Each structure stands twice: as structure tokens, then as C-alpha cells.
Image: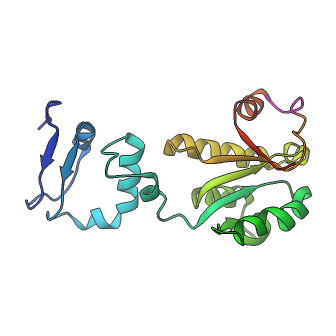
Amino acid sequence: MPFTSKLSILYVNNNSLTEIDDEIESLSHLAEIKLANNSWKFVLNTYKSEILYYMFAKGICLRFVCEEDVDADKVYDAFVSYSSEDEDWIADFLVPGLESGIPSYKLCLHNRDWAAGEFISDQIVRSVRNSRRTILVLTDNYFKSGWSRLEFDIAYQQGLKDKVRRLIAVVPNEVPDLSKIDQEFKTFITLTTYLSLS
């Protein structure tokens, strides 16, 4: 049954409801909704994170679903996308500052957290999906790296899919030379606020 747009409060708790179908999208305007104490099928508990993600991505009942709910199962606070040429700065400055600081953050680093023998592309996808944010360490070395563009693309697409700003740009030294990178990448960099640490 379609819900009227004039409806602002819906209490369907303490009923015999077993599942939610696509009609839940028509509830996004509600000021209050109660769904507790129904006979939800086991699938609701099994796929809780997927349901929360779906509701957040579709903008459904955002009063009840927030970014923290969607990210609750993430393993890392951030995946660090950087060139191996900048390994010293990452190890000496970024990692100690974020992992040992207050508050401390759990980082995903390819030199430390990736499994040997797996395809790099698969590990990039997994690292992005398992992280709340992706930190892009923008240097000239980064733009010369063969893998940096793939890491950027995957993280950017994940942010669009989740409707969450998932990319954090960090410039350790001077702003890198953008003249040699493709237009799409350059547009993102020039339109993004970045953290300069020089």
C-alpha cells in the first residue's frame, strides 16, 4: 500500500511484520517511525549492515541511519594511498602522528597490511571498502606511480556510491606539478581542499 506524503509519524511496532520491501523509500519524509518488536525474518539481522547502507545511500529515514552506522563494520579508519618513494615520510611522520596521537587512528598501509601473493587490484578494493576514509598523499612521486590512479578511482567511486566524502588529500611538501596528470584527476585535485603539511 503506498504511503501518503501527508503522513509524518508512523508506528508499526508490536505487529506481525516480517520484512521491508522497496516501499520503504516512500517513508523518507517521515519525522518519526517505529519498527521494533515485529517478527522480522532472520535476514534482517543477517544483513543489518547492508540494510543500513541501503537506507543511508537512498536517503531513507536519515534520522535513524547515520554515517557511523554505515561505517560500523569498517576495519580501518583510513587507507593510506601513497607512492612507495615516499615511504620514509609515511613511516616517520604520518603513521606515528595518526596511530600514536590522541585520538589514535587505525591505518591500512600496503607495505604492512596487505597479504603476500594476492592481486594488488583486489587488495586496493578491499582496503578502500574496509576503511572509513582514504588518505591521498599527493606528491610528484604519487602522480608518477602506476597504482595511484587506480587507488584514487576506487576510493572516489566508493565515496560516490556511499554518498560520503571518503577522500582526504594531504600535501606533505610543496604542491605537486599537476601539468602532467590527466584532466579528470587534475579537476578533482584543484577543486578539493587539501591539508598542507609543509
Highlighted range, magenta? 178-182
Residue 56 x %, y %: 40, 47
Q: Does residue 116 appear anywhere in the picture?
A: no
The front one of 49 and 136 is 136
- Residue 23: which quarter of the image? top left
Q: How is the image coloured?
A: rainbow
179 in relation to 31, above or below? above
Q: What count of labels does the image hold? A: 0
For the point 16% across and 59% down, the residue is 18
Residue 181 x %, y %: 84, 33
Q: Does the magenta stretch include residue 101?
A: no
Taking the image as shown, residue 55 lies to the left or right of residue 15, namely right
Taking the image as shown, residue 26 lies to the left or right of residue 176, namely left
78 in relation to 21, above or below? below
For the point 76% across and 65% down, the residue is 97
- Residue 78: which quarter of the image? bottom right
The front one of 110 and 167 is 167
For the point 14% across and 46% down, the residue is 10
Q: Does residue 122 appear anywhere in the picture?
A: yes
Residue 22 x %, y %: 26, 43
